[in-house]
Amino acid sequence: MFMLLSAGVLAQVQTPADSVYFLMQNSRILYITQQNPAALINSDIKNTSTIALNYNNQSGHFRTTQTAENGREISLTASGINTLGRFKVSGYFNFKRTWQDSLSWTLQGLPDLATPYYFAAGKAGSYQRINYNFGGLLTYNLINNQLYIGSGIDYLFNTASRNTDPRPSVQTFNLNLSPNLTYKIGSQSIAARFIYSYGIENNKVSFKSTQYRNQSGTEYPDRINYLIMGYGLLQGQFGVARMRRELKDNGYGLNYALKTQSAYLNADFSYVRHIEKNMESLENSANTKPYGTFYLNNYQGSFLVGLHSTNIDHQLYVDVLLQNGSDLNIHEFQGKVNYKYSQKKASFSYTVLKKSTSSLQTEFGLNATYNKIDKKDISSSISSTFGYIQPGISGAQYKRFKDKSKLSVMLNPAIRVPVGNTANSAADSNVFFNEIVYPDFNYWSATAGVLSFTSKYITPLLFKGICSGFSLNAVYTQELSEAKKVYTNSFQPSKNRLDFTFSFNLYF
């Protein structure tokens, strides 16, 4: 799909980087347009695309237990929109290669904070990951520019491994389909879609050294491969351990789009029920033994509205995520519920862009995020609540030069304030509580300053007929207080963390 998209776009002589990719408000409109069929059909964007080569680096001691101390990533990303007769297509392709250092207490292939079933070990190690993700959204004008049919598709393949005992080797595959039906009348469109996905993950954990493989658990406690089955319920694994995970999603979504000369509105709602079946792959056998099943309900809604006036463009974006889930533990409790999970997250951003006939434009904004995660393990009597609110402000300037080059600079300072954090356990000697829950409690209970910086340079001068340029995105987080910190012998988050991405971009 994306190869077809790129070929059509490259054949056209245009430079949409000015209007589509340069201004932050327009970039957000483009992102929504590429995700939802109603917004795609209702959009004036006919053909546009971008390709980027990215380098990402993450480092710093202010982190959660199951986050790597250092990480590097090289990626190639591409996305765009193309119109081909009755077809209108949005597509994307992402390839990432990741190296992580000093990652402990998780042997997962893809990081997942919600799932209760995974392997984990206290010994930190270096990971290598490869990720392929591509897909898009296809719509077809069925009847008189009013009725459209189509489908979204998303394919993911991920591998993960490390060279330290215990050594995981993980392969994850997932395919997502979302057939849709869209009705358009005048400046409005509404779409309904069904969501279905299926995936498989195979995780094999092994030991190269016999001294770790044959231990009883007391000689090298950090080399124990634990099977986590909740939020504190765990079992030590020695030798080779295997897990097969089957993933299924079922759900539906509705989205609405309105576009006039003075205003636009994009609204989206989706519900997805995620089912995760975890099984032990028996050695020298095609049979499996079930551990348990995890069910997660996902409710997500977003709202983007903009108003155009003579001197100012207003834009408001709101996003809400509600999750609740529980497991049925077969391994220990014959299919009874042991683990419960919930998340409530809401964020908003409001920006004002001042129009100007000069070469300089200014933008101001307000933003805030609220996030709360609750986890509970019934059998281990361990529970936690980690929450925060993060208000911030933003300012940006957009400069256009006489040679048609453009430069944007945006700064977004914010403060993360903990809200209602608790961590409870009936027995403090539980290794999971001491090594994971307590350090994470210390991390989320700290007040932190967050500074985001974004800059983008676009020019037609590097390549004839093609806009290109560079961009930098950086987020610096600094611990400001240590309120409620509980000291143990395990990892202690402190100081700061820096996450930055440098990109070379091509625009078509």
Image (spheres, rainbow, N blue to C red):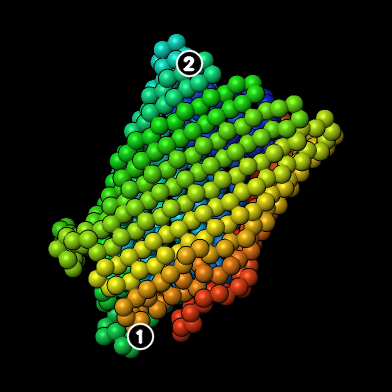
Report x, y in % for residue 442.
50, 73
Q: Which marked residue is nearer to the observer: mark 1 or mark 2?
A: 2
Q: Amino acid at mark 1?
A: Tyr
Report x, y in % for residue 192.
38, 28
Residue 114, located in which quarter of the rendered image? bottom left
Residue 220, disc: 1
Residue drawn at x 32%, y 51% is 296
Outermost residue, top side: 144
Q: Is residue 204 above or below residue 247?
A: below
**Left or right of 507 on screen, residue 488:** left
Quick one: SS at disc 2? Answer: strand
Q: Is residue 64 above or below residue 183?
A: below
Q: Quadrant of the N terminus?
A: top left
Outermost residue, front side: 420
Residue 307, disc: none
Q: Is residue 339 above or below residue 188?
A: below
N-terminal label among 1 and 2 = 2
Residue drawn at x 37%, y 51% is 323
Outermost residue, bottom side: 219
Report x, y in % for residue 389.
54, 58
Q: Nearer the viewer, residue 239 or 361?
A: 361
Residue 66, located in which quarter of the rendered image? bottom left
Residue carrying label 2: 185
Q: Amino acid at mark 2?
A: Ile
**Left or right of 386 on screen, residue 233:** left
